[in-house]
Amino acid sequence: MRGAMDHDPPIRVKNLNIYYGREHALKNISVDIPGRTITAIIGPSGCGKTTLLKSFNRLVDLADGVAVSGEVLVDGENIYAPGVDVTRVRKKMGLLSQKPYPLPMSIYNNVAYGPRIHGTKKRGELDRIVERRLRESGLWDEVRDRLHAPASKLSLGQQQRLCLARGLAVEPEIILCDEPTSALDPVSSRRIEERFRELKSSYTIVVVTHILRQAKRLADYVIFLYLGELVEHGPAGKIFEEPEQAMTREYVKGSIS
Ligand code: ADP
Ligand code: MG
């Protein structure tokens, strides 16, 4: 179901400004996020990475005293236009947060949760969805013989992959991740990164990270934010090897933290 929308990038940000009260958290950001790639949003703590990510599915609206101007177009539609169905917009996106938040139920039910809400009731069909999504998130072999155990029994790294599977089960187009490995050990982090590399042929992935090495390992495109401004955006090779801005050069050298 693409057709005419093929020419639009999955996410296009135009002159986006976001204020929390009087704090101007994002300053006139314009950027396109290309499809079926991994884009990393990098920059020091407090520079607006999470705010930008959350503007893509209107989660940013949930904070008190937020004011948004400008546009975020998802598949060509401005999601901040009056009357937009926010639930429908959010259905296009899976979200992975810093810590895994599995639902207090079995491994199986975590993955089946979304499809059930959207009307899939047949056991056989749910079984197929659960297996497929657990395979995609690299967890199937580890849990196939204990699908009905509580999700809380899994290690933190496994829980994060389960959350990925749960997100994939509602068939999003875009996967948004906010420092998705920050609570994980290095081995678990690598497994999540491996999944992203695998999944990017089918999904558009946006990952917030303050870990430069992770951005280097993962990103096709990089957005560098500093104090709420977009300093530079481009292919990862260019940003890391020959950035245009002095500020980017300093940051990727590790001189600014
Ligand atoms: P990052 O993810 O890069 O650390 P954030 O997007 O979380 O940055 O925050 C950007 C700025 O906006 C920071 O100065 C932060 O204090 C402020 N901010 C973030 N969330 C809120 C909020 N809910 N209410 C008020 N200020 C906020
Ligand atoms: Mg953040």
Image (tube, rainbow, N blue to C red):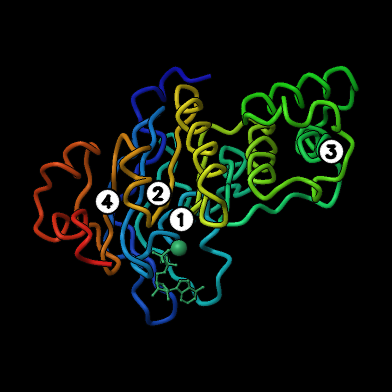
Q: Which residue is mark 4?
A: 30
Q: Residue 139 in the image: x percent, y percent?
A: 68, 31
Q: Is residue 68 above or below residue 34?
A: below
Q: CA distance from mark 3 to mark 2?
A: 33 Å
Mark 2 vs ligand 1: CB below 8 Å? no
What is the distance, in whole Å, between disc 2 and disc 4 at their CAs?
9 Å
At 37% from the left edge and 54% from the top edge, which residue is drawn? 211
Q: Identify the element where label 2 is drawn.
A: strand
Image side of residue 237 versus residue 172, left or right: left
Please say if the residues under marks 2 and 4 sit with CB atoms less than 8 Å apart: no
Label 1 belongs to which residue? 55
Q: Which residue is label 3 attached to?
A: 109
Q: Rounded to the nearest whole Å, what is the CA distance between mark 4 and mark 1?
A: 13 Å
Callout 2–callout 1 Cβ contact below 8 Å: yes
Task: Pick whichever of labels 3 and 2 is earlier in the sequence.
Answer: 2
Give the mark nearest the N terminus, 3 or 4: 4
The three-letter amino acid code for the residue at tag 1 is Ser
The disc at residue 72 is 2
Mark 4 residue type: Ser
Pick whichever, 73 or 231, lies toward us.
231
Q: Residue furthest bottom?
A: 22
Q: Amino acid at mark 3?
A: Asn
User: Of marks 2 and 4, which one's residue comes earlier in the chain?
Assistant: 4
Residue 213, x across and y down, in percent = 33, 47
The kind of residue on which mark 2 rests is Val
Q: What crowding class fits label 3: few (fewer than 14 Cα within 10 Å), some (14-19), or many (20 or more)?
A: many
Of callouts 2 and 1, which one flags the residue occurring earlier in the amino acid sequence?
1
